[in-house]
């Protein structure tokens, strides 16, 4: 099997590359990544170049994408602009990468009749009320809130249309919030951990009652592999690990595990249009593909993540100043 992993130098894509490298030793992996601020070669340590190749290039580059897809069996498409706060500040790159980039990949897999798995997010469904008994399922109507989630929704709809109109062999997955090592310091959990290490306060948006459904990134990777190998063409699979927690709970855990009191917590301006709650019903992938998450103890996973950021300051320190300067401009 020869696969292309787009966005394979980002947080989740690089975890997937490492996972496949370990779990499928006979596969050849080509990473296509333009190395934006979020892509980092050092997310990919210890890989043998005879099995993993990094092509630095843009998924919107039709010629490049076409030439790579021609020589591979499947594309696993992680590449995206992925941060809501950035999309609220400057939506344009989200339209280019998430919409035009996905279109470019679809046209190449259509032409060369290759398998595609498209990575998406639970945010395409909008948000739930705190007391809503229902969770997101594969049939929840799309209702995205931000430029980020609306471009991800648009990319999902393109994939579905290419399946129906052109018989493209594609599957989709919509996963909840990931955490773990190598996540960019702009995202909630790494931002707070690295703030404490830097002597800065934690920055909580609004009241902190917003709920996210946390999953360890390696569980996301194992689910994607299950879909790639056993998923039914044209189907969507929700990926989640029953990890609902409100933001204040997560902040309090970070404070506790890092030995700080609530004086370290600062309430900052809320994110415009801030989604209240995400929650995933993952029963379809569990029943149909037999997938189950391995990292079900969130507190243990969070402790490991704190330890990783504590021990890998060389990795995150170069991103930190520019990230916080951007937040300062946004008042968050
Ligand atoms: P990330 O921002 O850490 O990584 C994105 C990667 O894509 C980077 O390496 C970047 O260089 C690359 N990239 C961006 N634009 C590109 C382009 N035009 N051409 C080639 N490469 C490009 O993102 P992530 O958090 O790892 O998310 C990966 C995927 O998973 C995204 O599709 C995202 O929507 C989805 N997702 C993320 C989460 C989460 O919690 N982070 C949850 C569900 C789904
Ligand atoms: O400093 C912060 N303080 C804070 O309270 C940051 C950065 C965030 N937050 C809040 C906003 C959200 O309620 O924490 C929650 C999580 O925020 P993010 O890490 O920015 O994630 P979110 O907006 O939920 O989106 C994430 O999950 C779905 C990923 O970034 C997306 O790529 C994925 O699609």
Image: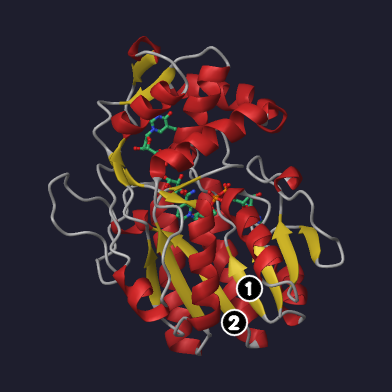
Q: Mark 1 and 2 residues: CB-CB less than 8 Å, in contact?
A: yes
Q: Is residue 186 among what the camera can see?
A: no
Give the structural element (helix, strand or loop) at label 1.
strand
Q: Residue 245's mark?
A: none
In the shown orientation, is residue 100 left or right of residue 66? left
Q: Residue 180 versus residue 60: which sits nearer the camera?
A: 180
Pointer 1 residue: 75
Q: In which quarter of the image is residue 164?
A: bottom left
The one nearer the camera, 105 or 292, is: 292
Place of residue 47 in the rendered image (x, y in percent of width and height, measured from the top left): 79, 57
The quadrant where residue 80 appears: bottom right
Residue at the spot 52% in from the left edge and 47% down from the top edge: 92
Q: Position of residue 7 (x, y in %)?
A: 64, 56
Marks 1 and 2, how far apart at CA: 6 Å
Mark 1 closeness class: few <14, some 14–19, many ≥20 residues within 10 Å: many
Indicate the position of residue 295 as horizontal and vertical percent values. Answer: 45, 52
Q: Can you identify the residue that label 2 sits on?
A: 115
Q: Nearer the viewer, residue 54 or 87?
A: 54
Is residue 16 depicted above or below 168 in this figure? Answer: above
């Amino acid at each position: 099997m020869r696969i292309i992993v787009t966005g394979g130098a980002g947080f989740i894509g690089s975890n997937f590359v490492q996972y496949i490298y370990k779990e499928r030793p006979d596969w050849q992996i080509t990473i296509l990544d333009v190395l934006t601020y979020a892509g980092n070669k050092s997310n990919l340590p210890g890989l043998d170049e005879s099995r993993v190749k990094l092509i630095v290039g843009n998924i919107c580059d039709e010629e490049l994408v076409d030439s790579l897809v021609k020589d591979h069996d499947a594309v696993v498409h992680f590449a995206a602009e992925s941060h809501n706060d950035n999309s609220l500040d400057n939506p344009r790159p989200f339209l280019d990468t998430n919409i035009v980039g996905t279109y470019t990949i679809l046209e190449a897999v259509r032409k060369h009749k290759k398998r595609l798995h498209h990575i998406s997010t639970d945010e395409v469904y909008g948000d739930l009320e705190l007391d809503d008994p229902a969770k997101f399922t594969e049939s929840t109507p799309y209702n995205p809130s931000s430029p980020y989630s609306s471009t991800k929704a648009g990319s999902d709809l393109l994939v579905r249309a290419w399946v129906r109109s052109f018989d493209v062999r594609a599957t989709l997955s919509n996963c909840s919030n990931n955490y773990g090592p190598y996540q960019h310091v702009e995202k909630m959990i790494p931002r707070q951990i690295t703030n404490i290490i830097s002597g800065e306060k934690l920055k909580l948006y609004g009241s902190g009652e917003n709920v996210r459904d946390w999953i360890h990134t390696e569980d996301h990777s194992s689910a994607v592999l299950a879909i790639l190998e056993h998923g039914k063409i044209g189907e969507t699979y929700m990926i989640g690990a029953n990890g609902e927690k409100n933001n204040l709970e997560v902040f309090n855990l970070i404070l506790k595990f890092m030995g700080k009191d609530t004086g370290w917590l600062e309430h900052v301006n809320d994110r415009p249009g801030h989604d209240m709650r995400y929650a995933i019903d993952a029963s379809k992938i569990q029943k149909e593909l037999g997938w189950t998450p391995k990292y079900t103890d969130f507190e243990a996973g969070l402790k490991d993540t704190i330890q990783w950021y504590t021990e890998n300051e060389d990795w995150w320190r170069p991103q930190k100043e520019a990230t916080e300067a951007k937040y300062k401009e946004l008042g968050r």
